[in-house]
Image (cartoon, grey):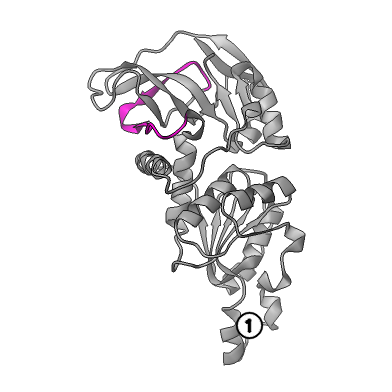
Amino acid sequence: MKSLIMEGPAKSRVIDIEIPTPGPGEVLVKMKYCGVCSSELEPWKTAVNGQTFGHEPMGTIEAVGQGATGVKKNDRVTGLSSPCYSQYTIMKEENCVVIPEAVADEDAMGEALACLINVGAQMALAAPGDPFVVVGCGYMGLGTISLMRAMGAGTIIGVDIREEARENALKYGADVVYSPDTLPEEYFFSKHNFGGHVLGPGRKKEMFSIGFSRVEEFAGTGSALRLAGDITGMAGCLGIGGYHLGGDRNIDFQQWNYKMMKVLNTQIRDDDLTTRYCRQALDLIARGQWKFTGTVNPRHIYSLEEFDRCQYELEQKPAGFIKALIRCND
């Protein structure tokens, strides 16, 4: 079978290897697509010979190992497996999720969808109708916007430097969009707005009316994280989903402390929880309760041999780019 490995920084190649055999409790999946995650961009640039990627599988079960009784051959599945930029991959049955008939192949990258459900769980609204801000409106930001719309958020604000990303945010449920330099001044909260730490009772009450109670950052840059922190209100919650992008960040922690902010890492690493959230995500989409489909432009489905071009375009974001897939079988 064909499988992708790295030769070195920003250079991959496709090799032929044996098709693996599923062991007890495992299944062999014939891959149709593997979703491309932005977390792979920096490792791709610095890759070493033999390194492998791919963790968003989607395909059909080709063979079932002993004891794997909850799934069957030809089931369409997604879930957890890595590496899976290859024609076949092995998945544990316990991390294998059958895709509902109503969900299209291109919309069924379960691992990515599970990450979004985790954002919703960690950043749940304090009350129905509360506003929500997303800084960074790529695939994950758009998924968060559409999910928060389904969860009953009030005004949803999208912030991005790219005009097309802002337009996409409106399509996926945002009410208002801004570029960073057009955000209204009254949205920003800092200790400097109030002249220091010692405030009278009236001013203290005023403090809680500035900024937002829920802000999620997905841009993965220092400037975006600082902006997200600046518009998080007193005792608000800042979720950070862009940890795995970019480099070091310079943050005014004194200000974050002053505002009593709760700061959450909204990534997920628990396999069992990820699998459960994957099922939940696909069920919500199948029922039409979460309208997060149509993010893949056919121009941005790449062959295994086009992986390096895919990574380049993932960084450059050509017109129409939201989510990229690698087509693993013809």
Asked which secondary structure carries label 1, the reply is loop
- In the picture, residue 38 is in which quadrant? top right
Residue type marked 1: His
Asked whether 88 falls inside the magenta stretch, the response is yes
Residue at (34%, 21%) from the top-left corner? 27
Residue at (61%, 19%) from the top-left corner? 303
Residue occupying the far right of the picture: 181
Q: Which residues are magenta?
A: 85-104
Which residue is more in the foreground, 159 or 207? 159
On screen, residue 154 above or below 173? below
| Residue 15: percent from left, percent from top | 57, 10
Residue that carries the numbered disc 1 in the rendered image: 197
Q: In the shown orientation, is residue 81 left or right of residue 237? A: left
| Residue 316: percent from left, percent from top | 73, 36
Asked whether 17 falls inside the magenta stretch, the response is no
Residue 181 is at least partly visible in this image = yes
| Residue 200: percent from left, percent from top | 60, 91
Which residue is more in the foreground, 230 or 155? 155
Q: Quadrant of the C terminus?
A: top right
Q: In the shown orientation, is residue 202 left or right of residue 266? A: right
Residue at (64%, 70%) from the top-left corner? 255
